[in-house]
Image: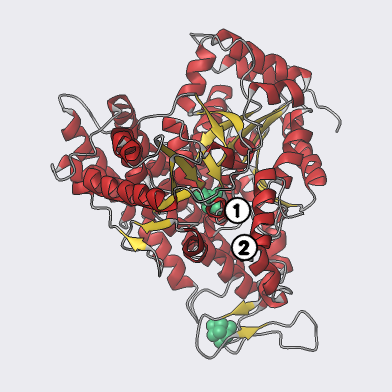
Amino acid sequence: MRSRDSAVNQMLEVARQEAIETTWDRFEAQLPQCGFGELGVCCRHCVMGPCRISPFEDGPQRGICGATADTMVARGLVRAIAGGAAAHSGHAKHLAHTLHKWVKGEAPDYPVKNEAKLRAVATRQGISSEGLDVRELAAKVVESVFSQFAEGEEPLAWAGATMTAGRVEALAKLGVLPVGIDSSIAEMMHRTHIGVDADPVNLLLGGISCAIADYTGCHIGTDLADILFGTPVPIQSEANMGVMKENSVNIAVHGHNPVLSDVIVRIAKEMEDEARAAGADGIILVGICCTGNEVLMRHGIPPLTHGVSQELPIMTGALDAIVVDYQCVFPSLVEVARCYGTRVITTMGMAKIPGATHIELVEGEAVEKAKEIIRLGIEAFKARKGRPVKIPQVKNKVVSGFSVEAIVAALSKLNGEDPLKPVIDNIVNGNIQGVVLFAGCNNVKVPQDNNYLVMAEELAKRNVLLLATGCGAGAYARQGFMTPEATEKYAGEGLKAVLTAIGEANGLGGPLPLVLHMGSCVDNTRAVDLAVAIANKLGVDLDKLPVVASAPEYKTEKAVAIGTWAISAGLPVHLGVVPPVLGSPLVTSVLTSGVKDLLGGYFIVETNPHKAAEKVFAAIQERRAGLGLGTSQW
Ligand code: BF8
Ligand code: SF4
């Protein structure tokens, strides 16, 4: 089985018939994958190498410089964290530059949309708003953001202000609070150069510090996106490939940063007439991966597909353009698009793909660029008109938009004075056993979505409240798990009662969806904010809460960075794909148990989704017992 998504499976059959190569074919061509790489015991950090460590005693046990398996594995892992941090914080920096350009009057298409969030963030960061107009305050916030990137004297203020005091103290005690995002990434590159840090534990501590820098970048990314484009509120839409229509101009936005896609959403509405003049019924925008999450959360743009299946919608013959920014965009898109006339449009100078059309996003001319891009889609539509299309008739309803602000607003309908109280009361009385945040990607090593679906079913029936972000959220959206109907079908009695009470108090006439969509991968910080608010209210630190994160199908360096900051925040983190660390029993044991004594969080590696759900549930029960709450059996 390649996927649990029936639209994907229909398109894989088309790919087979039409002899189009997919991600899955290339995966098979890679098999067997290199055993040294899988264990993390190869090194190319200098040109005396590549070196590798034999898993057997009669082979080499050290690289040419003397590096051991422990050193190699730790170096590889922390470099991955640095890669992830660079990506997330690059995205955040891009948003900061955009806001900065608006402050200077150079980007009129990017006014502050959400002044309340701007003021809330400023207050949180100790920036006085008094007497300042929006532009002046935005200037101060941007200045504060930029200060987080350079190396400073003090630990990162945006991390400190968004975590519990206990967490900040625990991290400070270990000496892992970073003093600059960029400097932290640079330090990881330095420390993993040949002949620098060879101590695996010291390297891992450095990796934790860099992961906190990643967290800071993610949080800035979410804050600035909300300031520029609005904080999401619950919104209904549809998901999966069946949302495309034969006689519409179908345009996908893909990647991560809403800087361009948010403008495209706005401008596409104005260009409906142009599309109709070309013989189309209109323009249908759809989203792929996290850019898709951003525009779903804020505008209800339907998510099309995610991660490993991103090539497949092209083979419907109905997708006129894919507009990409950066991260998780497969270069193979261009090859597939060539066969179907789909325009692949890259928009970032630092993320080009050979064979794609490049239209550089210039913030000062964002609207013009968006029009140019949409016109390419309309042209492609004209060229394909009359050719048969194969759109799988698969789509599901989805309710998304659950920012912390939206969740608190919904809860305040139950208790206006003390909105978190209903959630806490229900955790205490066991109606809600705990909370699991599903995050991360799809990975070709796992039948697409299977781990997400199996784990959600197992945990929901045991009354675990489920949150999701990233392509994980995408999986639940495509598969109909973000609906009130899914709650009726899968939730245990306690969970169902709570979700129904909240839903009815908000006039929905039924429960909230089974899985709450909290946004893109940088938006994992939204889940942290919620957990921090609950922890502060209870007067305990995050490492005591019955909250677990799970990345059952993760693949990227960004996901490694997030997983590492989540354990540093004190959460148990399940991984459904084995990370390349088993070549070092020392590193493996630090990550799965040693770190628990230091920070409370730890990794649980389990590839079987049924067993994984059981282990996650056990971790929740351990925390409940620690708080003196009643526990349940599996
Ligand atoms: O940042 S979940 S495949 S799209 S890395 Fe990428 Fe993974 Fe998807 Fe979003 Ni996140
Ligand atoms: Fe080999 Fe050491 Fe160079 Fe790595 S850094 S390639 S282990 S000699």
Judge from the rendering whether residue 350 lies leftward or rightward of residue 31; answer left or right: left
Q: Identify the residue at horizontal 49%, vertical 33% (top origin).
A: 529
Asked if residue 126 is positioned above or below residue 494 in the image, the reply reads below
Q: Which mark is residue 309?
A: 1
Count the marks: how many?
2
Q: Which residue sits furthest right? A: 633
Callout 1 touching callout 2 (CB < 8 Å):
yes
Judge from the rendering whether residue 583 lies leftward or rightward of residue 391; answer left or right: right
Amino acid on which disc 1 is placed: Ser
Q: Identify the residue at horizontal 51%, vertical 63% (top origin).
A: 339
Residue picked out by circle 2 = 23
Q: Is residue 283 visible?
A: yes
The x and y percentages for residue 250 are: 45, 43
Of 370 and 257, nearer the camera is 370
The x and y percentages for residue 246 are: 50, 41
Q: Which residue sits furthest left? A: 105
The N terminus appears in which quarter of the rendering?
bottom right
Q: Identify the residue at horizontal 71%, vertical 69% (top origin).
A: 28
In the structure shown, which secondary structural element does the residue marked by tag 2 occupy? helix
Asked if residue 190 is positioned above or below residue 464 in the image, the reply reads below
Q: Along the polypeptide, which appears first: circle 1 or circle 2?
A: 2
The x and y percentages for residue 522 are: 47, 44
- Give the CA distance from mark 1 to mark 2: 8 Å
Q: Identify the residue at horizontal 49%, vertical 35% (top origin).
A: 526
- Judge the density around disc 1: few (<14), some (14-19), many (≥20) Cα neighbours within 10 Å: many
